Image: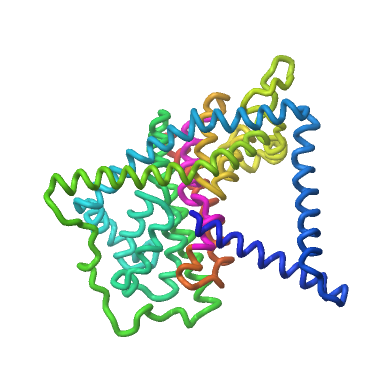
Amino acid sequence: MQENKRKITLNYNHWVEKLFSKLEDKLRKPLQFTTKRSFEAIVFLIIFVAFFWVLAYRMTLPLMLNTFMQTAYHLLLETVFYIMAICVLMGAISKLLTEFGVVRLMENMLRPLMKPLYNLPGVAALGAVMTFLSDNPAIISLAKDKNFARYFKKYQLVSLTNFGTAFGMGLVVIAFMTGLGFGKGALVGLVGAVVGSIVSTRIMQHSTLKTYPELDSPVVEGHIGDEQSISFKTEGSVFQRFLNSLLDGGKDGVGIGFAIIPGVLCISTIVMMLTFGPSGENGQYTGAAYEGVPIITWLADKVNFIFDWLFGFKNGALVSFPITALGAVGAAIGLVPRFIAEGIIDNNAIAVFTAMGMCWSGYLSTHTAMLDALGYRKLIGKAIGAHTIGGLCAGIAAHWLWMLISLI
């Protein structure tokens, strides 16, 4: 997670330096470092103050600050710890499935689908299962394994970024939605995520080959991968392996749970304050949690006929979920309990949320680091563009599939 943040910071710094270079060309003299920092600070302060001024103007400053802190506090107690508990349990289960060969069994069952659906070698199914049980970066650790990478051509290896991301944190998302009583919608959403993953992976492969035809070559020339060398089995007795897997998997779940805290508290708090309105009688602000100025809802309602047809959203506020999923799916699922409390959610919305949440799973914050780790940073734009289309297709497929099921 820290590596992802570092890569995003580097991209931002590169963009700022390009801006200053253009400014220096127009002024025909170099800018001092302190001048650059001052210019950046002024721009940031204008945006920062303008954002909170809009909220404070409607809510008043004391009530806005109280709502800001109360919302984060309630999200921490009511949502984050619940998600963390799910992450710990699912982490333990995932480790057990990996340790005792269930993951490899699932890989063998899914292997025949890889070539016709994704144009990937059968061993890629292992990557889908691993990211589904954990998170996006799991695909990179596999891609760096020489025995795994030897099955791929270069353009196929690059497309693993899109392929793996489409299943990131899938088990946690489905368990969370099912725990809230929307199991059917979650399963339909899983199918939608598969559709989105196919679209994203295929588009990525096509655009990569079109621009860089030289990538149509094996990752390792003249070598055949040894699948038998890819093993997750540890040493020891069955009981020892069981206990270690249970504890180690739970510990990994704690790490994922801690990693989602900043996203849920920061991103979800801001999104909620731009989604929901006042909760007091006669439309008055009280400073309670989950109040705000519903700018996102107001804008979405203006064109909600589009979202209604594509995703079946009856309320513009539901658009907040896919917007948040762009950055962090953990933060996005943190919005669901509030939607339920507002009474604006149903199985169709859950199906769309699951599909888009799984498929996107915060790709804007992970794609850069993942492609950089593979050594193909030049393809970041293509990967993000392909995955954006894939996520939209995932949501559309989930909605229309649910509509079809509802007619049966």
Q: Residue at x 19, y 51 (%)?
A: 100
In this picture, which residue range is highlighted in magenta? 345-369
Q: Quadrant of the C terminus?
A: top left
Q: Is residue 96 above or below residue 85?
A: below
Q: Is residue 167 above or below residue 270?
A: below
User: Residue 36: image x %, image y %?
Assistant: 78, 64
Q: Nearer the viewer, residue 366 or 322?
A: 366
Q: Nearer the viewer, residue 288 or 318?
A: 288
User: Residue 375: image x %, image y %?
Assistant: 48, 73
User: Residue 204: image x %, image y %?
Assistant: 50, 66
Answer with left or right where residue 55 lies relative to residue 98. right
Q: Which image quadrant for residue 91?
A: top left
Q: Residue at x 25, y 43 (%)?
A: 246
Q: Residue at x 48, y 63 (%)?
A: 370
User: Residue 346: image x %, image y %?
Assistant: 50, 30
Q: Is residue 221 above or below residue 67?
A: below
Majority SS type along the magenta span: helix
